[in-house]
Image (tube, grey):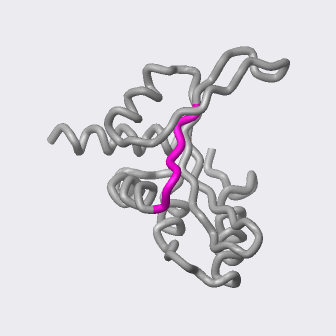
Amino acid sequence: GCMDIHLAYLAGIVDGEGCIYAEAKRSQSASVRLTVTNTSLTLINWIVERFGGNVHVCKKSRRRKRICYSWYVNGQRLAARILAAIIPYMVIKRKQAELALQWQPGMSAEASAAMVEAMSALNSPENRDE
């Protein structure tokens, strides 16, 4: 139905314009981040209206000629729900999504560090499928 089309569309956007990564702050377990950055506020608003999340405005700079907008998900549960829903449609970042879905609350420092390292390796330029 209509929701399947929205999920497939978001999967394509995340594959092409998104980033799935893990970070661990000192003495905390890893947290997974899901972001999409684009110059189209219409696109970012479309995502927020259907999937929730937040928007950050990236100002123009010498390197960035246009204002851009970042959609991001704060909160593991929402990120996991979105990733679980779009993973069947993902192509490029499926491995990152699968790894992100292994996140567990209260992960040990060792497990968190391993997740961050594995996610960094998947996102490194030599492993990127461009």
In magenta segment, residue 73 = yes
Residue plotted at (55% across, 61% down) = 96
Extreme residue in the front direction: 27
Residue plotted at (51% across, 75% down) = 105
- Image quarter where the N terminus lies is top left
- Image quarter where the C terminus lies is top right
Image side of residue 104 versus residue 121, left or right: left
In magenta segment, residue 28 = no
Residue plotted at (41% across, 45% down) = 11
Residue plotted at (76% across, 21% down) = 64
Q: Closer to the camera, 78 or 17?
A: 78
Q: Residue 76, image x and y in percent?
A: 48, 61
Q: Residue 71, image x and y in percent?
A: 52, 37
Residue 126 lies in quadrant: bottom right
Image side of residue 25 versus residue 54, left or right: right
Image: 59 above or below 78: above
Q: Residue 61, image x and y in percent?
A: 80, 19
Q: Residues in magenta?
A: 70-76
Image side of residue 81 versus residue 92, left or right: left
Q: Residue 78, image x and y in percent?
A: 41, 55
